[in-house]
Amino acid sequence: MPPRRAFQDNLLSSSRVLKAGGAGITLLLLLAEGVSGCGPTSARHVPGSSTPPEPSITALGPEFSADVHVNQHELGRSVAPTAFGMHASVYDNALHDPAAPALVRAAGVSLLRWPGGGYSDNYHWATHTLTAFHGGSPGYLAEGSDFGSFVQVLESFGAQAMITVNYGSNQSGDGPGEPLEAAAWVAYANGDPSSAQVLGVDGTGFDWQTVGYWAGVRASAPLAVDDGYNRLRIAHAAPLAIAYWEIGNELFGNGYYASEYELDMHASYDAPRRGLAALSPSTYGRGVVGYAKQMKAVDPSIRVGAVLNTPPMDYSWGPDWNLKVLAEAGNDADFVIVHWYPTGTLRDILDAPRKQVPSIVQEIETTMATCCPARVSAPEIAVTEMGPNSSVGIDSAHAQVTGLFAANGYANLLEHGIVNVDWLELHNGSFLSERNQRLGPAYKGIQLASHLVQSGDTFVTSTSSVPYALQAHAAARSDGSTSLMLVNLASGSVASVNLTFEDGWLPARVERYDYRPSGAAADGQVVGPVDLDPSAVSQLQVDAYSALVLVLHGAG
């Protein structure tokens, strides 16, 4: 069995660490045999199976030439308001650090995911309690991590939220998650205090009362005598308008296959769980439909998401999970969720955005078309956990790799239409440190990506003559300017760039942001904006292990 992600501050984490190979072959066999409920299937290309080897990046020498062309008229995907996200959690001791909101805003982050990966299938929002993990660990809740306090954090950050509801356990801790618990959470967040709409009694006998009851709790001040819900009484009359809601977290790790790390009490832990129907992807898919029905009865405008494996490299965690989940829930899910933790060498991490992101998106869209041919449009895709796999072990001397991966990763994902990308996590050192809010390499990379694009901007076509060494991303910004990101993935080679635009266009004013390493590969700083002579824009230099963003205004 692949080992779990290393524990962070002795806390159980949400995700896996090793991705097994052979994923494409596994999927081809499944498609050739067909999957019940998905209809006819056909074989597809295995990424990399016939791709000729690329030139060695180490053979570039101290300097290499690259031609970059931007077609500013050829529009691609637009950037969603939820694009720049961050994983936050109930075990974060620094969540209320007064320095955090300004730092997060300066990085361009505008969404926080809550309550935290694997914890979401243990966490009960109304009582601010955790069902114990099946290994016996009670988990950990940081001070001020209840949902009422989190709302105050959201508002101090000026951020939206992505909420992951509990699919794995009920409030009593003796059975599966209850859709009404999730529906009541929607009522608290988005409901009208005057609503008399009845929620009802769940399978444990708990009465979730009405939409107005929970919205009224949100809108009221704390009682003189606490009824157990004072932490939720935040005197917030206006609805929070939280739009995105995930149904559970990584349920393919519930024991149905080989891995058993995600709490799922749809079946007992007192007997073997492998292959039990109650833990199957089909059962989860039907659960997504049931949750969506109850939650959207409270607020029809919300978007409900289903958890998938990350194709094509992640099928070993559940070879038929995606197909069977989508066969049940594909017509009802508004978005699907994948987590992305590339592994391998430092070179593999730097290559992952270019090599893996197109395959991830293509596989999901193809699987959706296979399972739900009647659906008019594919669901949105959210990457609600992302970062280099902890097995890579990137030390401080090579931390620039993490920063470049973050910059290039966010840019690639958003360019392929991903509506939300959440780095894991807010305070683990890679983004911010918990003790002193030190800026980690991912902070710098995400900040640089946010200088490239923000909500409402649209990617345009850009090409690099040496994409394995120099990545290029360009966008038409909503203010009328054009932006360009160049990422030099070579550790020992300077890139001399010949930059051209369609129709020979040249800007009248140029701003430049640079992210260069400290020394050879240690994490550097983002510097800018610095005005650049427009006449110099056609010939650029990008240092080794560096990235830059140009913001180009007007026409010269």
Image (cartoon, helix red, strand yellow):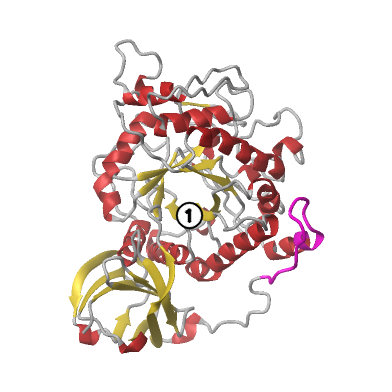
Considering depth in this image, is 486 or 371 the residue closer to the camera? Answer: 371
Residue found at x 69% / y 59%? 370
Residue found at x 33% / y 40%? 154
Examine the residues drawn in magenta and state their main secondary structure. Answer: loop
Kindly tell me whether residue 463 is visible in this rendering: yes
Vertical placement of residue 450 versus 104, above or below:
below
Asked whether, in this view, residue 62 is left or right of residue 235, the answer is right
The secondary structure type at the circle numbered 1 is strand
Question: Amino acid type of disc 1?
Answer: Met
Asked whether, in this view, residue 267 is left or right of residue 500, the answer is right
Image spot of residue 279 (x, y percent): 70, 38
Residue found at x 69% / y 50%? 327
Considering depth in this image, is 166 or 203 the residue closer to the camera? Answer: 203
Image spot of residue 480 (x, y percent): 27, 70
The C terminus lies in quadrant: bottom left
Image spot of residue 71 (x, y percent): 39, 81
Name the residue furthest top.
225
Q: Magenta stretch containing residue 71, yes or no?
A: no
Magenta region: 30-46
Name the residue furthest right.
33
Residue under pointer 1: 386
Q: Residues within 10 Å of mark 1 (few under 14, many from 20)?
A: many
Query: Total of numbered circles in the picture?
Result: 1
Image spot of residue 201 (x, y percent): 57, 19
Asked whether, in this view, residue 106 is left or right of residue 213, the answer is left
Vertical placement of residue 168 versus 343, above or below:
above
Residue found at x 29% / y 11%? 224
Kindly tell me whether residue 20 is visible in this rendering: no
Vertical placement of residue 375 versus 303, above or below:
below
